[in-house]
Amino acid sequence: MNKINIKPLSVNEAWKGRRYKTTAYNNYERSLLYLLPCSTIPLGALKIDIIYGFSNTGSDIDNPTKMLLDVMQKKYGFNDSRIYELNIKKEIVKKGDEFIKYSIESLII
């Protein structure tokens, strides 16, 4: 594994000024809050696995992750600073068959 000695840049440090949610994001957030099942999140460090089913092979694997995690925090009442492991995969599916699969587990550190 290669190591680069630089502090990772946060989203808050990367942008100037205030960012506003679009109508599409507000609709997505509302839909996700409704569709995410009720669940109890374990205490302590967390491991989250995500699989995105994209219909476009050009879809970036990391683009939807920030919004998904933000909505999960809102739904389940945890802080994403508790995430110590995050695994993301993508699958290509037919148009109309897009999906998000996920699991949230306790992580022993």
Image: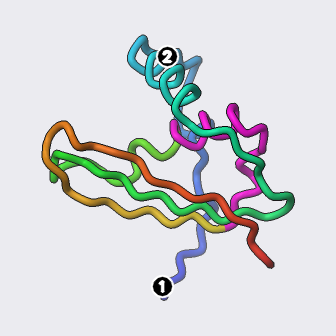
Residue 68 falls left or right of residue 107: left
Residue positioned 45% across, 17% down in the render: 27
Residue appearing at x 70%, y 59% in the figure: 83
Q: Is residue 48 left or right of residue 101?
A: right
Snapshot colouring = rainbow
Magenta stretch holds residue 79: yes
How would you rate the neighbour count of disc 2 (Cα within 10 Å): few for under 14, some for 14-19, many for 20 or more?
few
Residue, disc 1: 2
Q: CA distance from mark 2 to mark 1?
A: 38 Å
| Three-letter residue code for mark 2 | Asn
Crowd class of label 1 (few under 14; some 14 to 19; many from 20; radius 10 Å)? few
- Say which residue label 2 marks: 26
Stretch of the chain drawn in magenta? 67-84
Outermost residue on the bottom side: it is: 1
- Residue 47 image-quadrant placement: bottom right
> The disc labelled 1 sits on which kind of residue?
Asn
Compared with 52, 85 (above or below) is below
In the rendered image, residue 84, in percent from the top left (x then y), is placed at 69, 66
The x, y position of residue 98, in whole percent, is 27, 43
Q: Secondary structure at mark 2?
A: helix
**In terms of secondary structure, what is the magenta stretch mainly?**
helix
Image location of residue 16, percent across then percent down: 55, 26
Q: Is residue 56 above or below residue 45?
A: above
Horizontal arrangement in the rendering, residue 62 relative to residue 16 (left or right):
left
Image quadrant assignment for residue 51: bottom left
Q: Is residue 62 magenta?
A: no
